[in-house]
Image (cartoon, coloured by chain):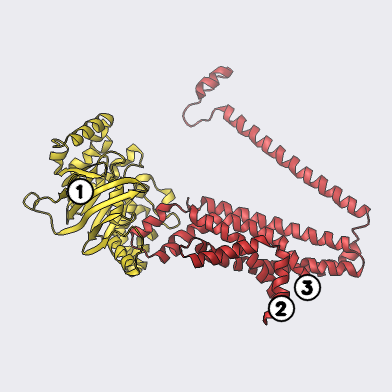
Chain colours: A red, B yellow
Amino acid sequence: MATATAGNTGRGVDTGAGQRPAILERIAASDRRHRTSFRVQFALVWIVLIGLLGVAMVATNNVQTDWIAEWGPYILGGTRETIFICVVSIVLATVLAIVGAIARLSRNPVINGVAALYVSLVRGTPLLVQIFFIYFALPQFGIVLPALAAGILALGFNYGAYMTEIFRAGIQAVPRGQREAAEALGMPERLVMRRIVLPQAFRIVIPAIGNDFVAMIKDSALVSTISVTELLWRASKAGTQDFRTLQALIIAATIYWLLTIVFSFFQERLERRMAEGDR
Amino acid sequence: MSGPIIFEPAAADVPHLGEVIVEALGIEKYFGDLHVLRGIDLRVRRRQAVMLIGRSGSGKTTLLRCLNFLEEPTIGSVEIDGFRVEADPLRAGSPERRERIRQIRLRAGMLFQEFNLFPHMNVLANLTEAPVRVLGIGIDQAVATAERYLEQVGVLDKRDEFPARLSGGQKQRVAIARALCMEPKVLMFDEPTSALDPELVGEVLTVMEELAHAGTTMIVVTHEMHFAREAADTVVFMDEGRIIEAGPPEQVLANPQDDRTAVFLRRFLSAFPDRAGHPHGVD
């Protein structure tokens, strides 16, 4: 085909062994041009729209550099708490989800029932209510938790319930033959789960966990309601002091946004690495 | 229901065979209302290579899976190397029964159509996982054993690769090495070449043939008639959940006594001449 193409163009190039026909080079160059042009336009759209947003905020007197210089670092400091809360909560949620998923797949009606109730209850009630419940209601049973611990517990329990269903699906997505091969080697049930099924299920659910982590960065703002000094709490505090609420919220929102961009980037990279890993 | 045929070659016919390793008695299996196995009796002796042949749906694979309880028989019992387990269709299974099933599985290596290597472990880890964690063998010794079997099946150079990087034929040979690492009393193959590209079938069958000639006890569900003729001590023909005919390959394959066997062979060989004529379907 290659020689025929060269012949048809009339250039008479002999595409012998090892030499690519010129048309391939031109197709590749054209592809590159299209890709670059797409990227440039894409970036321009972002720059223009974000620029417009910035201009609008400056014009409405919502961006004042001296105020930002004074309060910006204080609000930014809340990032530490926000990330800390999210990391600890997602670890807690993952542990709960693994236990929950195994329980939901159990043939034991008591274990299965408890796990199903946990998932149903947590998914059926607002996260805000759960946060209040743990912070304000537990003390009535003699359990007094610091705000930070209560917030982490609430987020962990909440996400644990959603992730239970994700892990359950992940475990069920591991091909049956994997379990059978392990059982046929004489591996006891627990070992099959721990060494063969869970590691593969984990790979399957990693993208979903990453998603949930990004979602949690935003949901963690709710623990500001019980005075955990994270991002949003600091923003409201700084804002109300100088009647600069809107400006403070803009700063907080920007930080949340940047955080999610950064973590989404890492999540995508992780996903890609797992994909090329060993499938 | 026809009377059960217990198949056991007379000692005089096959003097090289040893004691009974596998004994299945009265195996019946229902899937819902579907009667898949209708009373199977089978004995397999040490060093015997048994090939199960028959149409798809005749119950060969189900029988094999009942032998190590990947499938729970509805009726019957299985004994492998002295461990006997009765069918327990109501799943009232005690921990003690589960342990006996595990003991059976430790003694019966299983090879699957889809290989079922563990994709998250490299080849060496696939081979050492069960010996180390189930048998409690030291890692150094497990690695040495693994390398010996990898060499035997000709894929030692792939010891550090992940399964995704192997061809189907290499995967199945690694799977065979993995089963051998447990030093089983019997190897059970469930259509080990059915998922392979035709040009990769030969390398797996060659390994299996070597194992058979070296005296490995094996039960093989297969459609490779040439292989059966070369490697089997005994060919068992199944139809509609029963053993119809069993005997040495030259008898069952070349001179079948039962009409159903003859019809199957005629149809099969006219549909897949490759599998009869040329070694391993290659050439």
Label 1: which residue?
Answer: B50
- Report the residue at 61% width, 61% height from top: A120
Say the numbered circle drawn on residue A146: 2
Residue closer to the observer: B246 or B171: B246
Tell whether A19 sits left or right of A211. left
Percent x, y of residue A40:
74, 41
Residue closer to the observer: B241 or A41: B241
Chain ID for label 2?
A: A
Residue B84, compared with residue B50, is above or below; it is: below
Q: Amino acid at mark 2?
A: Pro
Chain ID for label 1?
A: B
Q: Amino acid at mark 3?
A: Ser
Task: Determine crowd level at label 1: few under 14, some 14-19, many 20+ residues with C-alpha closer than 10 A.
Answer: many
Label 3: which residue?
Answer: A227
Chain ID for label 3?
A: A
Tell whether B249 sits left or right of A136. left
Quarter assignment of residue A214: bottom right
Q: Amino acid at mark 1?
A: Val
Q: Label 3: state its secondary structure.
A: loop
Quarter assignment of residue A189: bottom left
Say the numbered circle drawn on residue B22: none
| Label 3 close to label 1 by CB (< 8 Å) | no
- Report the residue at 62% width, 65% height from top: A90
Question: Residue lying farthest bottom?
Answer: A142
Percent x, y of residue A251:
82, 61
Can residue B176 be seen here? The reply is no
Q: Label 1: state its secondary structure.
A: strand
Percent x, y of residue B233:
15, 47
